[in-house]
Amino acid sequence: MEGKSELTIGALGKATGTKPETIRFYEQIGILPEPARTAGNYRSYGAEHVRRLSFVRRVRDLGFPLETVRSMLALADQPDRPCGEVDALVLQQLHEVDRKIADLQRLREELDRLAHQCRGGHRMAECRIIEALSP
Amino acid sequence: MEGKSELTIGALGKATGTKPETIRFYEQIGILPEPARTAGNYRSYGAEHVRRLSFVRRVRDLGFPLETVRSMLALADQPDRPCGEVDALVLQQLHEVDRKIADLQRLREELDRLAHQCRGGHRMAECRIIEALSP
DNA sequence: CTTGACCCTCTAGTTGCTAGAAGGTCCATC
DNA sequence: GATGGACCTTCTAGCAACTAGAGGGTCAAG
Ligand SMILES: [Zn+2]
Ligand SMILES: [Zn+2]
Ligand SMILES: [Zn+2]
Ligand SMILES: [Zn+2]
């Protein structure tokens, strides 16, 4: 028994860069399994929880919604299935990010044009920015 | 009295590309003023409402939060104030969009790398994507 | 034995809408 | 004048993905 792996929720949080509230939230919506409890009713996490939560965080940080995290976890838990579905999810997310970038670049153009309409120093009544927003 | 400008909420919606629910919501949070009512208790809008809601939509479509819309409306209502504040808000939003684009481009890189790890055709147990997400 | 850091549950708030229930109004058609 | 359907009214709850707070319990150090 060389188990150093009994973590409180705060320790798990530090180990994975997640706030305790978020961890409880993930448990509540079924993303993380309910952990064991100590005598004092504290949640008690082990190495497997660290792995699973790290996975969740990595996937979330890549911008996937929690529903997709859920799917990925379910798939990852079935080692014999073909992996095409996971790979498709990644490609889909890549395309979505591409779309968002394109949207934001169009937006940027518009804002840039707008910003050049006026450099301040007017009364609101003559501000070209407000004018440009008004039609 | 050549007033053709008595719009129902649905007509205002069509005129501005906004759903009635959203218009009521804007009224509820004080972005739009309460309109007059007809005998049958229907909201009744005029040309000024069309102008104001169009402004709101333009500003929202540029990605500004409703709080900023609120500020802009308040400023625009004071024609004698200097316009520097509005102009600053636009610049600030421009910078924020730039930041978001940069963030998404970094994300895109990561996803692209991830997507190249595996092209499907494996068992989950050997999927490099899952591996790459797991450390 | 008390202090302070941590933990517990439960509830409500955030942003910007969107959807539904349960009913009222308007207007055209029969 | 009755009926139908499109529209309107209010109120309430829901979405994502957390975050924050109240009101308490636990634990280890000093
Ligand atoms: Zn100017
Ligand atoms: Zn200006
Ligand atoms: Zn592969
Ligand atoms: Zn694979």
Image (cartoon, coloured by chain):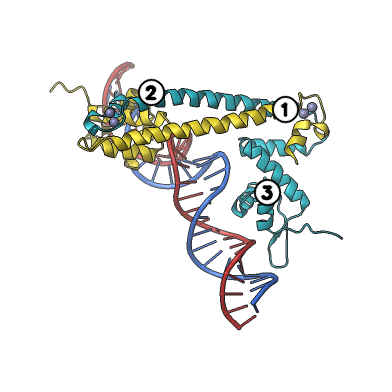
Chain colours: A cyan, B yellow, C red, D blue
Q: Nearer the viewer, residue A109 or D17?
A: A109
How many labels, in total?
3
Return the chain for callout 1. Answer: A
Q: Residue at x 40, y 25 (%)?
A: A112
Q: Earlier in the sequence, mark 3 or mark 1?
A: 3
Q: Can residue B112 be seen in this view?
A: yes
Horizontal and vertical percent position of residue B43: 27, 34
Mark 1 CB in 8 Å range of ligand 4?
Answer: yes
- Other residues around mark 2 within 10 Å, as few (<14) / some (14–19) / many (≥20): few
Q: Residue at x 61, y 52 (%)?
A: A19
Horizontal and vertical percent position of residue C27: 27, 22
Mark 3 CB in 8 Å range of ligand 4?
Answer: no
Residue wearing tag 3: A16
Mark nearest the camera among 3 and 2 is 2
Q: Can residue B33 be seen in this view?
A: no
Residue wearing tag 1: A87
Q: Nearer the viewer, residue D25 or A55?
A: A55
Return the chain for callout 2. Answer: A
Residue wearing tag 2: A113
Same chain assignment for discs 1 and 2: yes
Give the answer, above or below, for where B3 lies relative to C5: above
Q: Residue at x 32, y 35 (%)?
A: B86
Return the chain for callout 3. Answer: A
Q: In which quarter of the image is ligand 3?
A: top right
Amino acid type, label 3: Thr
Q: Which of marks 3 and 2 is nearer the N terminus?
A: 3
Say the numbered circle drawn on residue B102.
none
Give the answer, above or below, for where A15 lies relative to B114: below
